[in-house]
């Protein structure tokens, strides 16, 4: 078992005699909320309004996560007792913050595109059609909704492999 999986299992396998930290409890609550979002999206696959809500909501969550990472970065220097490590921790957090903010900026146009489609259909007076989908079959079940025991890191890796296998988009 990889060290990452050991860490993830250690967090989940907390003994009942150990009190969890309020920060860990808040993170676990957020993870449960995200799992509910994934299940709701799966239940409305092909629904353009569901897609709009999922994209814009994920964008808001990504920006909130970036702000949280920024706050952690401000907190780390006064918390990490080893000056030899604190620089690396802060640099890693800054890199993560940059990835999150860049990712949010890259997705922003998609929010506007989908919002425009939904608003256009609403203006025309017709319902937003539900499009039948032909999903690419996954080699690993997707997300906590499909496999509650699946580790989020494994799920991310599976999704990354699927994305990478798609290759470059149309030119």
Image (cartoon, grey):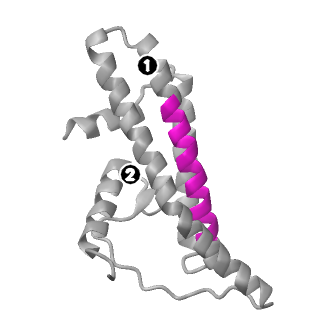
Residue occupying the point 45% across, 56% down:
144
Give the CA distance from mark 2 to mark 1: 31 Å
Label located before the other in sequence (2 or 1) = 1
Percent position (x, y) of residue 108? 55, 61
Residue occupying the point 36% across, 65% down:
141
Residue occupying the point 60% across, 51% down:
60
* Residue sitting nearer the eye, 128 or 88: 88
Indicate the quadrant where residue 142 lies.
bottom left
* Residue sitting nearer the eye, 170 or 128: 170
Crowdedness near tag 1: few (<14), some (14–19) or many (≥20) residues, C-alpha within 10 Å: some
> Label 2, on which residue?
149
Q: Is residue 17 visible to us here?
A: no
Task: Tell me the element at label 2.
Answer: loop
Crowdedness near tag 2: few (<14), some (14–19) or many (≥20) residues, C-alpha within 10 Å: few
| 92 to the left or right of 131 | left
* Residue sitting nearer the eye, 44 or 163: 163
Percent position (x, y) of residue 49? 66, 74
| 54 to the left or right of 69 | right
Residue occupying the point 48% across, 85% down:
133
Indicate the quadrant where residue 95 lies.
top left
Counting labels gives: 2
**Which quadrant: the C terminus?**
bottom left
Foreground label between 2 and 1: 1
In the rendered image, residue 30 lying in the magenta stretch gets the answer no
For the stretch drawn in magenta, what is the main secondary structure? helix
> Label 1, on which residue?
76
Q: What residue span does the magenta drawing correspond to?
A: 50-70
Task: Tell me the element at label 1.
Answer: helix
- In this rendering, is residue 141 above or below 123? above
Q: Mark on residue 66? A: none
- In this rendering, is residue 1 above or below 33? above
**Which quadrant: the N terminus?**
top left
């Amino acid at each position: 078992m990889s060290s990452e999986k050991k860490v993830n299992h250690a967090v989940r396998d907390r003994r009942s005699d150990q009190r969890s930290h309020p920060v860990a409890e808040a993170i676990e609550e957020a993870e449960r909320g995200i799992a509910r979002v994934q299940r709701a999206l799966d239940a409305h696959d092909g629904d353009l309004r569901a897609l709009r809500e999922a994209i814009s909501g994920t964008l808001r969550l990504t920006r909130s996560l970036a702000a949280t990472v920024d706050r952690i970065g401000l907190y780390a220097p006064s918390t990490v007792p080893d000056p030899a490590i604190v620089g690396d921790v802060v640099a890693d957090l800054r890199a993560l913050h940059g990835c999150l903010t860049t990712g949010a900026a890259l997705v922003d146009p998609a929010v506007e595109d989908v919002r425009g489609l939904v608003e256009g259909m609403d203006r025309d007076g017709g319902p937003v059609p539900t499009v039948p989908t032909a999903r690419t079959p996954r080699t690993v079940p997707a997300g906590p909704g499909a496999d509650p025991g699946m580790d989020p890191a494994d799920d991310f890796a599976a999704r990354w492999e699927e994305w990478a296998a798609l290759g470059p988009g149309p030119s």
